[in-house]
Every structure is written in structure tokens, then in C-alpha cells.
Amino acid sequence: MMKNPDGRDFSIAVGIMMIVLVLAGGAFAGSVPDAPTGSDYITSGSTPQISPVLKYIVVSPSPSTTLTVGQKQNITSRAYDQDNKPMAGVDISWTVSNSGVVNIIPVKARTDVTGGVTSTFTALIKGIAIVNARNASVVSNNIALIVNAIVPSIKVAYPNGGEKWIRGTTQMIKWNSTGSPGTYVKIELLKAGVLNRVIISSTLNDGSHPWLIPVTQAWGTDYKIRITSTTNPVYSDTSDNNFTIPAPSFSVVSPNGGEKWIRGTTQTIKWNSTESPGSYIKIELLKAGVLNRVIISSTLNDGSHPWLIPATQIPGVDYKVKITSTINASNSDTSDNNFIIPAPSITVASPNGGENWRRGTTQTIKWSSSGSPGSYVKIELLKAGVLNRVIISSTLNDGSHPWLIPATQAWGTDYKIRITSTTNPLYSDTSDNSFTIPVPSFSVVSPNGGEKWIRGTTQTIKWNSTESPGSYVKIELLKAGVLNRVIVLSTLNDGSHPWFIPSLQTPGTDYKVKITSTSNLSYTDMSNSNFSIISNI
């Protein structure tokens, strides 16, 4: 070991000098490079490492936050090094310009591995506190904590107007409070603005209280709730508008106007009741506002009652139902509007006008009936409003009856059907408009105008026939309305006939075909318009 002249260890002195030179940023014998200014070197073997250095502190929320008195707010500061990386182990202390406004816990803390540390600020009184985080000479941006004062208050939420609270039920009174109006409140019931009862003299100010409304509570539409702090009566509130504790009542639901209830059918009378108007009710039928019959003198107040309407009930459009408590006649209600018990009726549905019903076919006569016009009906055929024949003197009133139209029935366009109750001829109806039983007829289909038929070719003459104009027909060719030739004197009435047009047939544009029954010359038809016979196309 080397020693200097005064005996001290020379190697130790050299070592100390090397450390000083390194810390000062100098080089020693060219073996260690210069370190950046302001950085510390930590050597690991022969490789120098730069240690983290606190660069800045970021605080959030920023730049300001608003609190109310008593509110708590977390504020976090986060430390970053010279490489903008979170820095753990940094001691953070908070400072406040007005400690009377807020309280800080903790005032001092150390950042974690995320580089962050959080303190809780509690607002004490109204005011503004400017706060910041500091680590040695590194200081965060200021944060303004604005503390607003809260005026204690109570606000009734429910009932607050328009509610209907039924006696004997439990309803929930609700309110809101801000600030600190007190730990307990008193709840009162007002009627017409005057104290009616103390619902509860003291209950926890937790925002709600159940109230079992006494069954003996007077009904009324002018109730309000008042809630008051038990520690300071200045803090109080009343419902904004009135609520109702309704009187016991009935409300007829059906029939309530416009219904049509048929005699002999069972209908359900329905009603609602509020509170306890009585366990039993009486149901009455009114006609023109006067008692017509007692439907039932006492039945359970369960909301509905079946009523078999007598088949003998007088028809009318002015009926109402009245429901009354059997223990308190003042609790009553009547249908708002009239309902109808219609007179029995029959309505012809088919034929009701415009139909074409052919002789020899079976058609279905249809009708509907309401009330009880009778179990059987008579069906008649009218022609020009006069009885033509009785189709059936008595048939079940079931809404339909098949009718085979006789082949000999006179044709006409003025037929109607009349249906009448066999027990009461007042209940009757006739078709609204006439239907037709058409005359037998032919209708030429082709040629019917505009065709061009070539001489020497075979063409098909076509026609339709209705009913029975005859089993055989004669077919003639007309030119300019005059018979030109008989195409066939007699052929089966089957709707078509082939015609070989003679090659010597005179060309012309004024040809028509005429078809006539061989048994009745009055049943005939011809082409509607001219067709042409030409030599070639």
C-alpha cells in the first residue's frame, strides 16, 4: 500500500478524488465518460446507469373543482422523472392557502409504483382554497377548491298533488332534504290548509315514511302533507297541490252507453267501486230514467253480475243500469248514457239486389235476425212487389235456406225475397233491391266484330247460352244485315261449330253471324259488329 510522507494511505486519497471527479462531471484517466449535467451515475460493473430524477408533478382534477359544504373530494398527484415515466418513492406534501375552507388527509404521502398518491379534501365552510402538491422545489399547478354553502331544506315529493289515496290502504310519504335540516322530522296531514292530524311526531329524516290511512279518515279533495324538521321548524315544506281521500263510490262500467243487448241473451253488468261502499249492492234497470225492473235486490259487490234479459223485455233505446249500496243508498251510480234493447228484427242478406239467379239452379237465401223474432220463418218470392210464390211456409230461423228455382219460373228483373216470422208478422224484411231471373238467351262470341276470315279455311263459330234457350240452334250468315246463307240448319247447342268457308264466298267487310234456337225463334243473337271474309292475307 502506498503512503504519503505524513503517513496517510495514498490509495484512499486517490479513490476519494475519483468519486469527487465523477460526481463533478469530470473524467478520470479517460476511463469514465462525462455524465449529462444534472444527472447522477450509478455504475454496474463497467457500464454507467443514469438514476431517475424528479422532473415534475401533475395533479388532478385540474384546474379547479367545486364542492359543497361537507363534500369529500379525492385529489391525486403523480410524479414523473426526466424521461416522463411515473416515479415511485417521491414524498408529496400538500399546501392550502386557506386551511379554514378545507381539511386534507393525509397532508404528506409517498407516491406508489404508478407514481401517484391520493389525498382526500373535505369541504368545511363556504370559500375558496388554493392548493398544490410540492416535493422540494417541484410544485404542481394550483387547484382552486370552490366550496359552496348549502341552505338546509326539506321538499315534499309525494303526495304532491292529484293523487287518490284510499282509506284503509298504506301509502308511502316521500320527501327530499338538502344540507342538514335535522336528523328527524315531523309529518302532518292538512285539510283545507288546517292541521287535520299529526301522522308522526318524529321519524328519521331518511326520505320516506309509510302511512296507514285510517278507515275513519274524513274523505276530501283538499288534503296536503307537511314535513318539518324537529330541530328547526324553519326547515319545512308542504305538498304543492291537493291530493284526494275519496268518498266510497260506485262507477258503472257496462252497460255505459251505446251497447245493444238482445232479449233472451245473457249479458254481464260490470262496475268498479272505491273504498268500501258496501259488501252488497242492488242492481236496477231504468227506462227513460224511471225504474223498469229490479234486476237483483242484493248481490255481492264483486264488480260483475250476469243478467239474462227476459225475452219479453220491452224494446227501447233509453235504458240505463243503476247500482246502489244496500247499506247506504247515497253510494250509487247510473250508466252515463243510454243503451239499447233492440226490437226483434229480420234482415235479408241474399239476394239483396243485383244478383242473377238462373232457373233450374239451386241458390241459397240468407238472412240474419236479432232479438227473438221467432224460431221459424216464412220465405216468399215477390215480383214487382207482388207475391209471386211461397218458397217455403215454415223453416227454421237459422239464417239460410236452399231454393231450387223452377225451370218454369217466369223470367224478370224485378224479383225480391221477403222473410217473415211465423209467430209475429211484424218481424219481417224484404230484399233492399231487385234481383234477376234472366230470360234464356244466346250470346255470339266469335266472330263478334273485326275478325278477318279467309275463304277456303275452317273457322270456329262460338257462342254462349243462358238457361235453356233450346237444345239445338240454327246458324246463319248475314251480309249487310241480309241473309247470305244458312251455315247449318240445326246443330247441337254446345257452344261451338266449325265452318268451312267456301272458296267462292264473296269477299266483304259487312258480315255477321246469327244464332237462333230451333225451338223458340225469340231466343236469338248476332255478332255485335261486322267481320270480314277475304281472299287471302
Image (tube, rainbow, N blue to C red):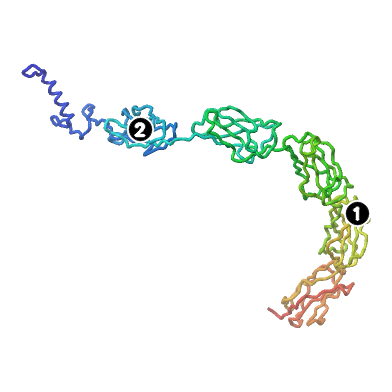
Can you say which quadrant of the picture contains the N terminus? top left
Residue 53 lies, in percent from the top left, at 26, 32
- Please say whether residue 152 is visible from this viewpoint: yes
Q: In this view, does 456 lie to the left or right of 406?
A: left
Quick one: SS at disc 1? strand
Residue nearest the observer in this picture, 446 or 259: 259
Amino acid identity at mark 2? Asn
299 or 27, which is in the foreground? 299
Query: Taking 278 as reference, is 393 left or right?
Result: right
Q: What residue lies at 77% left-to-right and 50% top-to-bottom? A: 258
Task: Depth check: give the residue in front, 41 or 315.
Answer: 315
| Image coordinates for residue 491, horizontal then vertical, percent | 85, 71
The residue singled out by tag 2 in the image is 98
Question: Residue 355 sits in which quadrant?
Answer: bottom right
Question: At 78% from the left edge and 82% from the top edge, which residue is drawn?
Answer: 480
Circle 1 residues within 10 Å: few <14, some 14–19, many ≥20: many
31, above or below 358, in the image: above
Instruction: For residue 471, say whether it is visible.
Output: no
Say what amino acid the circle numbered 1 marks.
Answer: Ser
Q: Position of residue 471 (x, y in %)?
A: 87, 68
Residue that protrudes farthest toward the front in the picture: 194
Q: Sequence order check: which comes first, mark 2 or mark 1?
A: 2
> 527 left or right of 147?
right
Residue 421: give its label. Answer: 1
Q: Which SS class for mark 2?
A: loop
Q: Mark 2 against mark 1, which lies toward the viewer? A: 2
Q: Position of residue 368 (x, y in %)?
A: 84, 54
Quadrant where the C terminus is found in the figure: bottom right
